[in-house]
Image (cartoon, grey):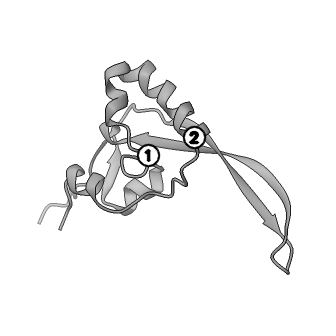
Amino acid sequence: MLKSVKQIIEGPVSEYTGSEATRLMVEEQIKAKYGVSEIKNLDCYHNMRTFKSWANLGFKIRRGEHAFKSITYVEQKDPSGNVIKKYRRPVSLFYYRQIEPITSNKSV
């Protein structure tokens, strides 16, 4: 059964790890696109996700929407589990206002 956006927002938590830098970066982009009043709705744990995460939940990105850009840091570890290197990786995120349910166009 397809879940509504409200159920998704109240449901599973995204991969967001609580980075203040990520939140601020995304916040600025949300302000630019939707206005300052939209910041109250931003919840990086529930309504800001990657393309793949939205797809796994049964949603697609609306045609013409562009990703919000962020970064994450990935750790490279040796076989013992010690961190030997950290590097930046860009991340493309989509806001809940940019999605719609995936529907099947198959005729019976």
- Residue at coordinates 43% horizontally, 41% vertically from top-left? 94
40 lies left or right of 103: right
Secondary structure at badge 1 equals loop
Q: Circle 2: is it few (<14), some (14-19), or many (20+) Cα within 10 Å? A: few
The image quadrant that residue 24 belongs to is top right
Distance Cα–Cα, label 1 vs label 2:
10 Å
**Height in image: 26 above or below 72?**
above
Q: Quadrant of residue 75?
A: bottom right
Lateral position of residue 83 relative to residue 58, left or right: right
Residue type indicated by callout 2: Glu
Q: Are marks 1 and 2 in contact (CB under 8 Å)?
A: no
Per the image, label 2 sits on a secondary structure element best described as: helix
The disc at residue 100 is: none
Label 1 crowding class (10 Å Cα cut-off): few <14, some 14-19, many 20+? many
Q: Which residue is mark 2?
A: 20
Residue 14 x, y percent position in the rendering: 44, 57
Amino acid identity at mark 1: Cys
Q: Name the residue tied to disc 1.
A: 44
